Image: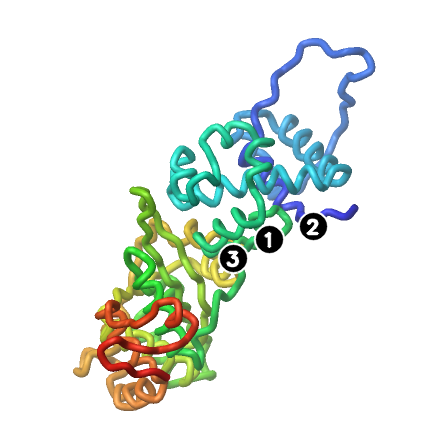
Amino acid sequence: MKTNLSLSSLLLNLVSRAPRQPVVDEEPEDSKKVGTTIRFEPVTRRFIETQAENLGISVQEFVAMTFKAIMKATEEPQATELELMADRFVEAFTRHGIPVADIPAILPEGSLTRSDLLARKDLLNKLDDATIQQVSTLFTLNPGWLKGVDSNPHKAPFSRWYKNVSGLAHRLAVLNHTCRRVRVLLIAEKGLTLEKLRVAKEKGDEVDAVDVGVVIEKEHLVNGVEFRSYEVWESERWNYSRCRHCLKAIMMFCENARISYDGVLLEEDAISRLFYGNTLAADEIRGYRELWYPDQLLWGDDRNLEADELPSIRSFYEESKAGKYEVVVRQPYLVKDWDEFERGRFELKSENMSN
């Protein structure tokens, strides 16, 4: 049976949980270890030495454990996937800042007990499809990653905002109702300045692409436990006018609806991992330090280097129909039926209007 796990997934799982192997002075004659010499490239050896040091074991022990993990994954792929599923289930909570002891409080009552978390077998028996889907929805994770059969934690993108500003506005209105708080993060590469954005706007494809991506940060409070999760939408070129207009319309919606929005600067490789879905968004965004200030792009004076574009942005925003969701964010009690609203039916109590 062929395993779907990548070598990188196996190594990550091994490094994150493998205990130090006890040193045995004497072994039975038929189980003596066979010595051999392996030559590694310098960069590979540095990686091995770093991982071994982190685990507190020797390089030889780390190499032996790694090959043993590969052997088990090849010969017993079902067992490896199940072990990885148990690890990733717990990891989904802890990487979002939730203590292991609080995991049962996050899930529906009766789903899991703290004692289930002590034994891998007991935990696996509780991880049915419904529980996996609940955790997947809670943290916006790829169910396949939780099951140990996919290496990408997130499906990328969660959704598209390009030519879909109204769709993003609808999503923000729903999240504003279901979450404790929502915030829009506009992600760009470190070194970004408003001047670089202006040049990208004016020069278009004559200069390198300046990408800006959208992430929705959701703040939750469940049974007294606070945590944040993330929806990673897409990243597109500021150079292209239609993408830029959509991004500015998103800012305009946030401004009018009073939803917080901030610019975040990350390293190029972090941005790549984030928008391809092959890293936990919480890992890349948590603790960021560098910001940029997108609200300046809506100012109507000379401090806005792109102020000449504001009239066309206002017209584009009106055409997008995103503005109708502003009142839903500011006055959510006006929505007649939230279940119907989430399915796309726009009907307010006070105006008895629907589209």
Asked whether residue 188 appears in the rendered view, the answer is: no
Q: Amino acid at mark 2?
A: Asn
Q: Which residue is mark 3?
A: 154
Residue that appears at 62% across and 30% down: 62
Tag in front: 2 or 1? 1
Q: Earlier in the sequence, mark 1 or mark 3?
A: 1
Q: Amino acid at mark 3?
A: His
Q: Amino acid at mark 1?
A: Gly
**Quarter of the image where one finds residue 164:** bottom left
Observer-nearest of 246 and 206: 246
Residue 171, percent across and down?
38, 69
Crowd tier of the residue under label 3, counting other residues whose Cα lies within 10 Å: few below 14, some 14–19, many 20 or above: many
Q: Which residue is mark 2?
A: 4
Crowd tier of the residue under label 2, counting other residues whose Cα lies within 10 Å: few below 14, some 14–19, many 20 or above: some
For marks 1 and 3, give the CA distance: 9 Å
Residue 119, percent across and down?
55, 28
Residue that appears at 67% across and 47% down: 5
Residue that appears at 62% across and 29% down: 59
Observer-nearest of 285 and 164: 164
Q: Which residue is mark 1?
A: 144
Rendered-image quadrant of the C terminus: bottom left
Residue 120, percent across and down?
57, 31
Circles 1 and 3, Cβ within 8 Å, touching? The answer is no
Circles 3 and 2, Cβ within 8 Å, touching? The answer is no
Q: Is residue 337 left or right of residue 45?
A: left
Residue 58, percent across and down?
59, 25
Q: Secondary structure at mark 2?
A: loop
Q: Earlier in the sequence, mark 2 or mark 1?
A: 2
Residue that appears at 56% across and 53% down: 143
